[in-house]
Amino acid sequence: TSRQSRDTSCVSHAEKICEKIKWMKTHSKWNFESKFNLLQAECHFTRGKIDKAAASYEAAIKSASEHKFENELAISYECTAYFYKDQGDDSKAMEMFKLAREAYKKWGAAGKAESLAPFLAIQNPDHL
């Protein structure tokens, strides 16, 4: 994916979508804020704007939590976990993978939750 390879060719398209979601957010903040923040975080990450990406990931988590979107919370935790893993912050990544797994379970996506188990087992086999 472009996120992994840092191929920015699709980022301009994503940023156009981000602008549309930003406009939608002005009409329904609770429904679009976390989506906007997560897409913005991915764009920042792909462009190498690490500090902005970190802030946007955290904002996506906060918004999804506040607005009780369990699905978006789980996805935000997972994307944030991959972000921190890529940055070499294994402790923070592990925390986010754990939270993602719990959020997926709460959402009812047991299979997806279990797919994250290897990320937790690598550092702490008793965590499962």
Image (cartoon, helix red, strand yellow):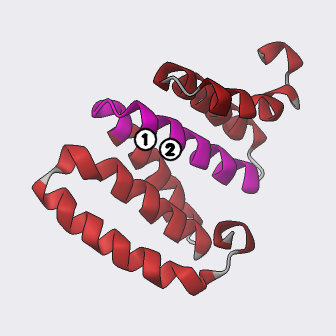
Look at 44% across and 55% down and name the residue there. Answer: 38
Residue 21 in the image: above or below residue 102: below
| Residue 117 is a magenta residue | no
Q: How far, Cα to Cα, is label 1 from label 2? A: 6 Å
Sort mark 1 into few (<14), some (14-19) or many (20+) by Cα contacts within 10 Å.
Answer: many
Q: Residue at x 56, y 21 (%)?
A: 105
Q: Amino acid at mark 2?
A: Ser
Determine whether the residue tagged by mark 2 lies in a helix, strand or loop: helix
Residue for point 45% across, 81% down:
13
Snapshot quadrant of residue 66 = top left
Decide if residue 116 is in sight here: no
Residue toward you, 21 or 81? 21
- Where residue 107 appears, as percent x and y from the top left, is 47, 25
Residue annotated with mark 1: 72
Relative height, residue 24 to residue 46 (above, below) = above
Give how far across and how far down residue 14 sits, in percent. 45, 74
Counting from the top left corner in percent of width and height, residue 42 is at 53, 63
Q: Is residue 60 left or right of residue 43?
A: left
Q: Main secondary structure of the magenta part?
A: helix
